[in-house]
Image (cartoon, coloured by chain):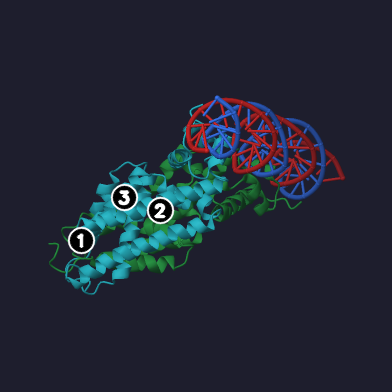
Chain colours: A green, B cyan, C blue, D red
Amino acid sequence: MARKNADERRAEIIEATLAMADEVGPDRLSIDQVAQRVGVTQPAIFKHFPSKQALWDAVGGFVGGQLESTWQKALAGNSDPADQLRALMRAQLRLVRSLPAIPALLFSRELQAGNQGLRRTFLGLMQRFHDVLAGVLADGIRSGHFRPDLDHSRAAYVVITLVQGVAMRWSLSGRGFDLVKEGERLLDVVLQGLLADGVGA
Amino acid sequence: MARKNADERRAEIIEATLAMADEVGPDRLSIDQVAQRVGVTQPAIFKHFPSKQALWDAVGGFVGGQLESTWQKALAGNSDPADQLRALMRAQLRLVRSLPAIPALLFSRELQAGNQGLRRTFLGLMQRFHDVLAGVLADGIRSGHFRPDLDHSRAAYVVITLVQGVAMRWSLSGRGFDLVKEGERLLDVVLQGLLADGVGA
DNA sequence: TAAGTTAGTTATCACTTACTAACTAACGGC
DNA sequence: GCCGTTAGTTAGTAAGTGATAACTAACTTA
């Protein structure tokens, strides 16, 4: 019968949900599939989460927690502003690589339509990521590392867009390239800019 | 009874599918919902498409056709390389704005898991968009508009990533900003680069 | 205008879904 | 070693799913 402590089981279910969401898609994932993955009957899941939506709620909370804790570590290890940007991007992309359901999750109606609160959670996360990036950029502008005429908020959106875009392309392409490396390469191009010197000034 | 010509009805069904996919999500959309939108009973849909998957196939083909036809027009009207990049981005984002189901569609398992051929269609589209962008960039490098040390293929991926990323953020944020304008703003930042002159050389 | 074609209908099937009720057996404190 | 708690089971329900079969009525054309 292999009973387990409820906390442990909850974590196991959340993990299984993320793994299965990656395999079959968040909106197609049934409680029964999660249960099978965990090695338990379907109604057992409802002993730990009152409804499917509550399970998704918990999954979202878990992902959000992981995201936020990773940023702090990324900032701590670097001092050069460009390196801090790189570290933040790497941290974010590494998390996506280890939880590859995230991009699909963001577009799932399970979270979008069914769960107003969770939607706000994710928007809040994005906002905080923007603020962290904007802070790094503002420092770098002051210290002369970045262009003096740069709008730090807008530039932060550039970096966010780059992160989300490359994660999206990585997903769509069947994960056919090294996500973290590609992200770094793109960031390098953006740091330099596309225009020849003296053209856009 | 209001019968309609089959071609007309097919187009109507595809349109309704795209609209409903945006509202309820591609993976949650049932044939019955599409039928109701069209104003017809559920089995009538199967008179025009042999299966649900065939319907999605047709939807994908429609979207792909729209995408490709828009690029040609964008290139024709401009001569300056930077303007061509802007025009391509605007064209792509305008299409996403008019068919807002596209981002969610790309992540739907309906298309990913259920439909191998359609997946290849979309990857092919992305590849061709990359090639168009890379061509513009290569021309611009030769003519001195872009940095001589720029890798045109990599820079093309930067622009693609920017397009997909901003479309994604627009979707997630509840379409709370002007997609086309924001895309242009981000492209402008990328054209200039982030680094101060002389820092990254 | 009669006849064939076809866009539509109603009725139904087999299956999956989230969820519930009632029961069972493992664990932990005493 | 007893007993309450609780993680788990089996059995079942109501609603929704994609799809099919058989029929009907509107267009098309000879």
Disc 2: CA contacts within 10 A as few (<14), some (14-19) or many (>=20): some
Q: CA distance from mark 1 to mark 2?
A: 25 Å
Compare marks 3 and 2 and give the one earlier in the sequence.
2
Residue A67: quarter of image: bottom left
Mark 1 vs mark 2, foreground winner is 2
For discs 3 and 2, the disc positioned in front in the rendered view: 2
Residue to which mark 3 is pinned: B93
Q: Is residue B169 above or below residue B138?
A: above
Q: Amino acid at mark 1?
A: Ala
**Same subunit under labels 1 and 3?**
yes
User: Which amino acid does the dot numbered 3 rest on?
Assistant: Leu
Residue underneath mark 2: B64
Q: Residue B181 location, x and y as percent? A: 24, 48
Instruction: Please tell me if label 3 and label 2 are on a single chain.
Output: yes
What's the residue at 66%, 49% (across, down)? A35
* Gap in angstroms between the C-alphas marked 1 and 3: 17 Å
Rendered image: mark on residue B200: none
Look at the numbered disc 1 and give the secondary structure of its residue: helix
Q: Earlier in the sequence, mark 1 or mark 3?
A: 1
**Element assignment for label 3:** helix
For the C terminus of chain A, give its image quadrant. Answer: bottom left
Q: Write down the residue under mark 1.
A: B82
**Element on which disc 2 rests:** helix
**Which of the two labelled residues, at mark 1 and mark 2, occupies the earlier sequence position?**
2
> How much space separates mark 3 and mark 2, taking CA atoms?
14 Å
Q: Position of residue A87 (x, y in %)?
A: 36, 64
Residue B97 lies in what quarter of the image? top left
